Image: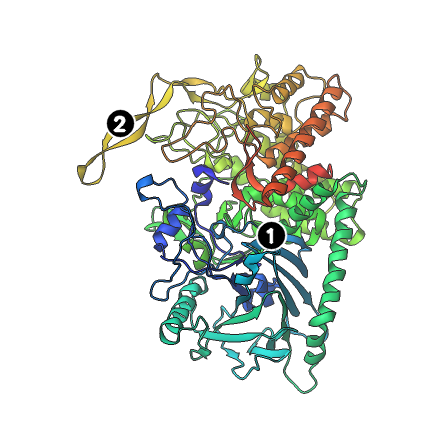
Amino acid sequence: MTGTGRRTVRSKGKFAVADGSDVSDVSRTSSRPSSKSRMDHRRDGSLIRILNVDLRVMLAIGLVASLAIFFLIQSLIAPVEESHQRPRVVTPFPSPKLMELDQDGRYHMRHVCQDSDELSKYGWIAHNGRDFGKQELVDQELKLETSFLKSRSQGSGYGGDWAVQIDVQHEKSGPSNELLKTGHMFFYLADESGNALSPNSHADENNVDSLLASGSRADVGAWQVHLNSKETLEVHYSGFRTSYIHNLSDLILQDLSEQVRNFGRLQLPDSSENSANILVFQVAAKIPFRMDITFVSGTEGKGSSSEQRLSSLQGASLSTQLQQKQAEFDSKFEQLFNGAHKLESDSTIVGKAAIANMLGGIGYFYGQSKIAYPRHDNYIAYWPAELYTAVPSRPFFPRGFLWDEGFHQLLIWRWDLRISLDIVGHWLDLMNIDGWIPREQILGSEARSKVPEEFIPQYPSNGNPPTLFLVIRDLLNGIERNIFTDVESRDVTSFLERAFIRLEAWLQWFNITQSGKQKGSYYWHGRDNKTTRELNPKTLSSGLDDYPRASHPNEDERHVDLRCWMLLAANCMQSISKFFKNGDIPGKEYASTVKLLSDFELLNEMHLDPTSGAYFDFGNHTEQVRLSWKEVRGENHHLKRELVREALERPKLRLVPHIGYVSLFPFMGKIIPPDSWILEKQLDLISNGSILWTNYGLRSLAKTSSVYMKRNTEHDPPYWRGPIWMNMNYLVLSALHHYSQVDGPYRERAKQIYSDLRSNLIRNVVQNYNQTGFLWEQYDQRKGKGKGARLFTGWTALVLLIMGEAYT
């Protein structure tokens, strides 16, 4: 999510998730920006693409990394623009160069899925989360479609066999097609365990079916990779021995540069290092063309069925199976989300993209988190751990975030319950002995290489909203309402029974570490009470980053959103305890905690402002804080001008008068009685265009707030101080839907607001998707335009549940 707030937490780095769906296209440019410059400006200028086939991940856990495709195409593409405003004196004329020559044979290569690739459109348009997916990419004048299929049959090794079908077409007919006659496709196979891969150096480049490579693993057995196409293909390769797969592009660029300098050819050298564990293939063909890449396992032995299995995953047979899988995806989508056939065609396209990209972004990660720990050189390594998780955004935030994941699972469990249980279980397995879970998972050298060092350590004193209880609540309700099959019910019951001890420890951790001075109060730890740079010290642990809290953090704070999260958690634990009351669950009686946190009068006493009807945080606060330019001494005692925080009056203990998402948490939690006058006040706040209401969704902070759309530091633009976020709007809609169905004097008003807000959100997301081809991290509260990270198919994908009116 853009804005320094989210980027500070999630950091500015990017890397490929384990689905390997990394895509792009190629061009030559006249100069190569430094790696530091590319990181700082989030534009690395890389322009040669690769298809990533990571054998260890793909074969061990069944994820098809073969869809990582990076496309080498034309030599006449406009140079990449700078991401920041430059003085006119150093801004080149905005017209294509007349002489587009490479310097010393150097080219730029794109490797991972990142927004700086500047594709006009890319993403999954179908994906079932298991054995099928189809994605579409539009890059310059080219349209690239990749589809994958996994197959497990008798004779195949662990993980089964798989195939990828790649179709390259011109996006539009026109004279430029003559300049783009030939396309060069790069893809690679990698074994992260270091097992040697053997290229088939005698492959006939005009052969319809060509063995590209082979190898063997203990878990998979002997395997082969084949290339199949009706078109004439030219194939070249390079083999490397390295453990740093994320730096592979540098090795390939070196090979290509040497080939250009020595032979004048832009092609790989058809050579391999000894015991290479990475093979890179370059396939050239005239556009349009189609090719199939097929992996078959269990190829050893005379009685092997590999030839039959290979034949079934190529050509017409593969195309037929992909069509069948597409039909199954479409049918399941209609059954789950459009049973009443209310969705318009535009909404259906967006809805399918939402679920497909959510599922297609699920990845497998392995490594050790870095934990802040003063007694061990300021940090200590977590134990080696694996994580199977969805991600907020493949190009911007391709790793696990704890509070995002609960929202992701609201969608995923409805599509595939087993996948959802696996993901929740992986997250709970990251819990330490105290019951703490690190909120951001930066696992492995590749992940760390993309995140600035200062943002990597996780702080064991800081929490994150326990949103996994959102899906736990749904599962409990599903059992109660008998919506699951017998097998699914047994799976959920078994999971909850095994997970209980960890869920209990998690809740206990919050009660011990995040509780406030007053009984029944809580506050987010981790705010900086010594900052001289922030207008309002961020509360990163809350997930709402720069949303305004008390101006002077201390232990007197009470945060209403955390109190509501704790009620959700306690309610779930009480329900699980009751469910297993005759079993072996050693749970506590949570009734007293639920009774305390659901005490409406106590909630109002702590957090309600009766005048506005809004719920506020409480703390040491003054509104008289500003950022002013000051001269400060930096390194080497040099004077420099900086924006410095300045308090114009002493703070005092009081309610923090900022209306926004936090003010609605008791409403979103359905804690307010349906006949309470406070519910009417909350509906007033939601529907008032001068406060939260817009024609595109509810803004995150009221226009009446003193920090509305204000920067938090010189370098931090507003993040949760105005823009529209889908996860909070989903929770508001869920509450409106609830209050529109229960008896009370405000039922009809809640129903009308619900209908209007739902229509506004769907219309705006669909309109943005039609205009840009993407779902966005947030939406502008003034004009509805998508902002921040694009291809943000984390909680923005909740628009599909809004379309299907699927709430708890």
User: What's the residue type where badge 1 is placed?
Assistant: Gly
On residue 630, the disc is 2
- Secondary structure under tag 2 reads strand
On residue 123, the disc is 1
The reply to whether residue 553 is in sight is yes
Q: Which x, y percent locates residue 755?
A: 72, 28
User: What's the residue type where badge 2 is placed?
Assistant: Lys
For the image, the number of numbered tags is 2
Q: How crowded is mark 1: few (under 14 residues within 10 Å), some or many (20 or more)?
A: many
Q: How far apart are marks 2 and 1 (CA)?
A: 46 Å
Residue at horizontal 62%, vertical 50%? 357
- Secondary structure under tag 1 reads strand
Q: Which of marks 2 and 1 is nearer the N terminus?
A: 1
Quadrant containing the C terminus in the rendered view: top right
Residue 745, quarter of picture: top right
Q: Which x, y percent locates residue 201?
A: 51, 82
Q: Front-most of 367 and 432?
A: 367
Q: Front-most of 182 and 246?
A: 182
